[in-house]
Image: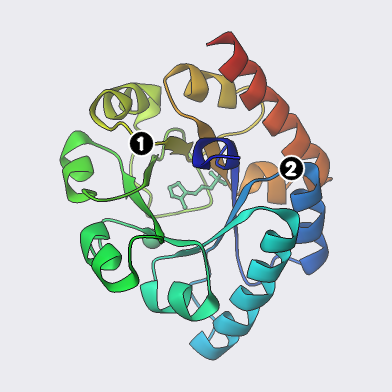
């Protein structure tokens, strides 16, 4: 399975996400998980990250760490996801090596220029979201179209993507959707993941 396919449904989890939920969504077909934990002490984050890496690898999914190259490397992650205020992707590549998968966030073409060297980019917030209070104004699927024209690697949309909102993101050129609440706040996370995957695959087929 290539990177694009693995990123079809890319779930962001935190330190408080139950192990059983991670297990269930991986079994449902989530192809990539990002550990995004901003408050726990680093030693604890490392223990959790290693455990989630194991879960991902058993399921054949990719494991990424948000923001922190040091944690990603220490945990044996497949890659790191860097924001505009984190280490530049090219520096992360230089430190970690050619096999590491480097993801970067961008909302505009100017920000895409800062993401030079990334293997994939996340574009957003596309829609309004309560999951990231400092996310900025929604940029909509037009930003996905624009960035897909300028970046030849995989592009995922992020921010407020729920049922019915994934297909337009794929139609705009993305290979997948990155989500938190659509899966983790659903009554049955595994069913929500399956449904989102179905919507993404259908939109990819129709494209
Ligand atoms: N970056 C941009 S929007 C966002 C992040 C981490 C939050 C996505 O969460 P949700 O619940 O899928 O809107
Ligand atoms: Mg970040």
Picture disc at residue 32:
none
Q: Indicate the position of residue 122 as horizontal and vertical percent values.
A: 40, 43
Q: Residue at x 52, y 11 (%)?
A: 207
The numbered mark, 1 or 2, whose residue comes first in the sequence reads: 2
The residue where tag 2 is placed is 29
Question: Can residue 14 be seen in this snapshot?
Answer: yes
* Horizontal relation, residue 39 to residue 33: left or right: left
Viewer-side residue, 104 vs 4: 4
Within 10 Å of disc 1 (Cα), the crowding (few <14, some 14-19, many 20+) is some
Q: Is mark 1 within 8 Å of ligand 1?
A: no
* Horizontal relation, residue 122 to residue 23: left or right: left
Within 10 Å of disc 2 (Cα), the crowding (few <14, some 14-19, many 20+) is some
Q: Quadrant of the N terminus?
A: top right
Spatial CA distance of label 1 from label 2 is: 22 Å
Which image quadrant for residue 134?
bottom left
Which image quadrant for residue 52?
bottom right
Q: Residue at x 34, y 39 (%)?
A: 137
User: In the rendered image of this protein, does residue 146 appear above or below residue 187?
Assistant: above
Circle 2 SS class? loop
Q: Residue at x 57, y 27 (%)?
A: 166
Q: Indicate the position of residue 106 as horizontal and vertical percent values.
A: 30, 44
* Horizontal relation, residue 120 to residue 54: left or right: left
Q: Indicate the position of residue 182 as horizontal and vertical percent values.
A: 66, 41
Picture disc at residue 153:
1
* Horizontal relation, residue 18 to residue 202: left or right: right
Q: Residue at x 81, y 49 (%)?
A: 27
């Amino acid at each position: 399975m290539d990177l694009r396919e693995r990123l079809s449904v890319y779930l962001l989890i935190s330190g408080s996400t139950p192990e059983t939920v991670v297990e269930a969504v991986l079994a449902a077909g989530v192809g990539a998980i990002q550990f995004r934990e901003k408050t726990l002490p680093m030693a604890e984050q490392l223990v959790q990250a290693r455990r989630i890496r194991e879960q991902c690898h058993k399921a054949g999914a990719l494991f990424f760490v948000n923001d922190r190259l040091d944690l990603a490397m220490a945990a044996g992650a497949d890659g790191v996801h860097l924001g505009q205020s984190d280490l530049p992707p090219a520096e992360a590549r230089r430190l970690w090596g050619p096999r590491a998968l480097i993801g970067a966030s961008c909302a505009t073409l100017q920000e895409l220029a800062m993401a030079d060297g990334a293997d994939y980019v996340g574009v957003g917030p596309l829609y309004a979201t309560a999951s990231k209070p400092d996310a900025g104004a929604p940029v909509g699927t037009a930003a996905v179209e624009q960035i897909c024209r300028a970046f030849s690697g995989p592009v995922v949309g992020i921010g407020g993507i729920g049922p019915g909102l994934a297909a337009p993101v794929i139609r705009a050129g993305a290979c997948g959707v990155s989500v938190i609440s659509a899966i983790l706040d659903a009554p049955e996370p595994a069913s929500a993941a399956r449904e989102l995957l179905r919507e993404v695959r259908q939109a990819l087929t129709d494209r």
